[in-house]
Image (cartoon, rainbow, N blue to C red):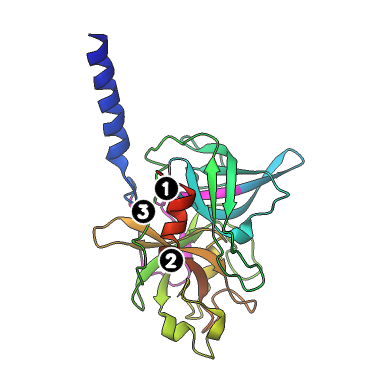
Amino acid sequence: TQDAVMLKFVILVLFAAGAYGCGRPTFAPVVTRVVGGEDARPHSWPWQISLQYTRNNNWYHTCGGTLIASNWVLTAAHCISSSNTYRVVLGKYNLKESEPGSAAIRAAKIVVHENWNSYYIWNDIALVKLQTPVTISDTIMPACLPDAGVILPNRAPCYVTGWGRLWTNGPLADALQQALLPVVDHATCTQPDWWGSTVKTTMVCAGGDGQLSSCNGDSGGPLNCQGSDGSWEVHGIVSFGSSLGCNYPKKPSVFTRVSAYISWINNVSPGK
């Protein structure tokens, strides 16, 4: 019957959506212990997005971000200007090339944290709702969110990804970059000769060994850390670094700690 055919179709759709889940790329990242940044394996971080704004009928990359549901993207509050019109580009590896399977979707709504403080860089988090949900595929899928309140141990191996500058004051990358940035625990990162009281418990530090790696992470992009079940979680949002240069010694990159904002994320994007 027609109803039976329709039911089979619905089951197939649900099965296809469930086959991807979150944080499990079809093309697994090549996670090496390379010092500094390197080109990522194409589409191995399929939740990485390019946040772009328009000027004179052209679109320009401004920040990174993380797909966390078919219609929601996580980025940094400092990436958002109320005077700009934004779109989200998904499924990309090289920003300069036309790539099959990629998508560009306008932002329908942007929610900046109500307590965002640009002077102290507190609550540097924002959510972008897409005008239409994106189709989850081999090249576009969400990252998992960590459990609320999770604190990563010192030296936990995480990876920052983005199209940021290849070195201090250097050119922006065309191909997506990745860099190993081990977590620096709060006790270390808040020492006076590190970041001191600038870093709050709602932040997470990573890197700071003096290698030129944190430039590879664009503002708003993810700090990717692998969970015990093998899936990748977004534990940080690239927030700020040292004005002295990329990953200056004892000045690691500082990220908004996503696990401190799980209830806020769920309140803004119910039923993601």
- For the point 59% across and 48% down, which residue is it? 110
Q: CA distance from mark 2 to mark 1?
A: 24 Å
Residue 261, position as x, y percentages in the image: 45, 62
Q: Classify mark 2: residues with Cα within 10 Å, few (<14), some (14-19) or many (20+).
A: many
Circle 2 SS class: helix
Q: What's the mark number on residue 265?
A: none
Q: Earlier in the sequence, mark 3 or mark 1?
A: 1
Q: What's the mark number on residue 260?
A: 2
Q: CA distance from mark 3 to mark 2?
A: 15 Å
**Where, by quadrant of the figure, is residue 136 drawn?**
top left
Quick check: 212 above or below 76? below
Residue 246, position as x, y percentages in the image: 58, 73
For residue 231, say whether it is visible: yes
Q: What's the mark number on residue 46?
A: 1
Q: Earlier in the sequence, mark 3 or mark 2?
A: 3
For residue 96, say whether it is visible: no
On whether residue 261 falls in the magenta region, the answer is no
Circle 3 SS class: loop
Q: Tell me the amino acid under the disc marked 2.
A: Ala
Q: Tell me the amino acid under the disc marked 3.
A: Cys
Find the magenta span and give its range: 28-51
Q: Classify mark 1: residues with Cα within 10 Å, few (<14), some (14-19) or many (20+).
A: many
Q: Is residue 57 left or right of residue 163?
A: right
Residue positioned most to the bottom:
192
